[in-house]
Image: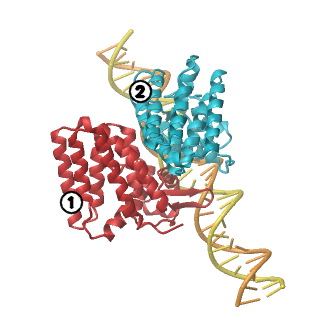
Chain colours: A cyan, B red, C orange, D yellow
Amino acid sequence: MPAAFPAEPQMSSTAEEEAYRHVQRALRLGRYKPGDRLIPEEIAAEIGMSRMPVREAFRRLASDGLVVLRPNRGCVVAGLTVDELYEIFEIRSVLEGLAVRLAMPRIDEEEFEELDRLLERMERAGQSGSSDWVVRHQEFHGRICALSRRPKLIHQISALHVVIEPYMRIWFDDCDKPHSAREEHAAVIAALRSGDELHAEKVMQDHILSTAPMLAEFVSPSR
Amino acid sequence: MPAAFPAEPQMSSTAEEEAYRHVQRALRLGRYKPGDRLIPEEIAAEIGMSRMPVREAFRRLASDGLVVLRPNRGCVVAGLTVDELYEIFEIRSVLEGLAVRLAMPRIDEEEFEELDRLLERMERAGQSGSSDWVVRHQEFHGRICALSRRPKLIHQISALHVVIEPYMRIWFDDCDKPHSAREEHAAVIAALRSGDELHAEKVMQDHILSTAPMLAEFVSPSR
DNA sequence: AAAAATATTTTTGTATCCACGTATTATCAA
DNA sequence: TTGATAATACGTGGATACAAAAATATTTTT
């Protein structure tokens, strides 16, 4: 339910769900900064409900690693240290590597064309400097993961994309340079076409690991 | 905070935490069966609190994948299908494989002796048929993970161990046969001693993947 | 007797209330 | 002025209250 990828359509039936979506969205867009305190009463007022559903939403957000909940001291926006950021990318590398390996046998020509299309869309967003490059990028990775047909794997990877999303946005906004993303992602597609599962897995791992250092510069220095 | 491994010592300061521990423990021990409905009021009464903290604990347990929460219809114990069980073991294989790779450079002779001790303890528990073989087994895997010094990685792996724990217990209880576990784990230690990171990673992956089919027999057939 | 409709009970979701813990400010002594 | 201490404001955790939804039991109808 963290859901970076699937763009889940369903309308929120409960107040808790609405609170969860509302705060998660704000966090992904970087509206709050790490360390900011989230006061249930304020957020509840924003979306017209009482504190209880918001409190419950906080629990889920804490499980997702988006906020930190300390007893009697409330809810603060989680931030990543450089080490934690690298760690997340290490984890992503093996999880998405696995996803690629599992996806390979399920990709037909039609699917390759879809991946090419997604790559193209990501590139266009990148050219225009629009920050929905980040969303397109998630879509690209998400599409490959989806092909693995492993719900829990998809879910976990998606959750990690949510956690790093604010940093991806900062990174993208701060670098006009047309970075090497295009070639790297094209290389992933090429590796998938090669039919060599282990090779493709490796290419995805390398792609992900090569991204981390670029983001690391934009992580708040210490803590 | 799912915590299969670290045997966190801290006393529960909040009611929510106590509820979380209480229910998680019951689920791990297999006291409830998949599909069982958990009624907040009942559990609250058991441990002497109101249903609010229990509700909140449910949210976390749902994030852990231990229960399923459906709006307006309460909380039911999650069960794994065969596919889901295999999927979890696939995920474990790459995560724990990564952990082994990262742990390797940090293991000294003293640590190897500790691993041997843990292997021995696991074996003794296995011989005596005591079902804390499962706990010893977690300790062994947990020790290796801990050496990776990657908090989030450790946390995720630990969470997966919690999810499969009930099935591990059923499996162990149902098989008096002294299974191949001893050799497999000894092989992991040997691979770590070899100093070849990629080899050790592979050995751990194979070990984990080879376990899945044995457990799969004890998963309720369909659903 | 089976199916449908209705009433009743149970349980869930959310709001409100209160006591306690924490942070902040004000007051005072060195 | 600075550091300790007391007073105050604020926020959190948890209990309780109540409305709405689901599940269950009951009655009615065919």
Q: Find residue B167 and report its image quarter.
A: bottom left
Residue located 68% across and 41% down the image? A48
Residue holding disc 1:
B123
In the image, A5 versus D28, the foreground residue is: A5
Q: Are marks 2 and 1 on the same chain?
A: no
Is the residue B22 above or below the residue B151 in the image? below
Q: Is residue B6 visible?
A: no
* Residue B159, image x, y percentages: 41, 49
Residue contact between numbered discs 2 and 1, judged by CB atoms under 8 Å: no
The reply to whether residue B221 is in sight is: yes
Count of picture labels: 2
- What is the number of the mark on residue A82? 2
Q: Mark 1 is on which residue type?
A: Glu
Instruction: Give x and y (percent) for residue B188.
Output: 26, 49
Q: Which mark is residue B179?
A: none
Using residue B40 as the reference point, say whether residue A46 is left or right of it: right
Residue A83 drawn above or below residue B137: above
Q: Quadrant of the C terminus of chain A?
A: top left
The answer for how far apart the CA atoms under marks 2 and 1 are is 40 Å
